[in-house]
Amino acid sequence: MVDDNSPKSSEDDDSLALSKSQRKRDAHEVRDLGGELAALGASERARVPIPEDIVREIDKLNACKANGARKRQLGFLAKQLRRHDVQPMLDALEAIRQNARSHTLLHHAVEEWRDKLLGLKEIGASEALTQFLVDYPDADRQRLRQLQRKAITEREAERPPAAARELFKLVRDNVIPS
């Protein structure tokens, strides 16, 4: 005989506490995780701790061309993912996203320096060059000055920005550590 007054286990409480809507949101999150894992390139996917059975399902998903087949395979991948602890995968994906965000910020900083060196910002080109050399003392001063003058001349003559591109590369090599 079952005693109705007996305390239920915490696992039963958790499953009863989750609404149907919450379970659907959780299922969609896992499905989105599967889609995100499938969209990763080979080098990025190697940085994520993915179980072998999931890797096989991701490869099958990427092989599918028809939309209906992709959708079914993604659903199956999500079902397989729910059998695993996805937190390490989520953490690795967040690290990849963070790396991409920092790379984007560095790229914007390089563009900002290039624009300053070309005199396109509020400070003059010579002041920008002085400030860049203060911030990055290992930079090749002579090469920077040459490219800066050449790029400004190209811009004024409305020629293609070959020197500006070289200047961008030189600034990038100094701003972004190897």
Image: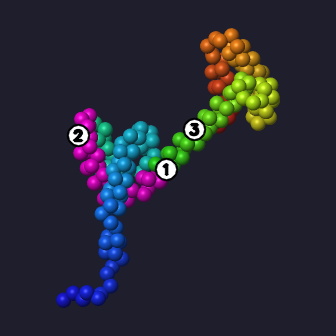
- Residue 67 inside the magenta-drawn segment: yes
Q: Where in the figure is residue 66, as x and y percent of width and height?
A: 24, 35
Tell me: residue 39, above or below residue 3.
Answer: above
Q: Where in the figure is residue 23, as x and y percent of width and height?
A: 32, 61
Real-space CA distance between mark 1 and mark 3, rounded to the nearest whole angstrom: 15 Å
Q: Where in the figure is residue 133, as x and y percent of width and height?
A: 78, 31
Which residue occupies 42% across, 52% down?
89
User: Is 168 on the left or on the right of 30, as rendered?
Assistant: right
Q: Residues within 10 Å of mark 3 (few under 14, many from 20)?
A: few
Tell me: residue 100, above or below residue 166.
Answer: below
**Mark 2 lies on residue:** 68
Residue flagged by tag 2: what amino acid is it?
Gly
Q: Quadrant of the N terminus?
A: bottom left
**Mark 1 lies on residue:** 94
Q: Quadrant of residue 128?
A: top right
* Count of numbered tags: 3
Which residue occupies 29% across, 88% down?
5
User: Is 177 on the left or on the right of 4, as rendered?
Assistant: right
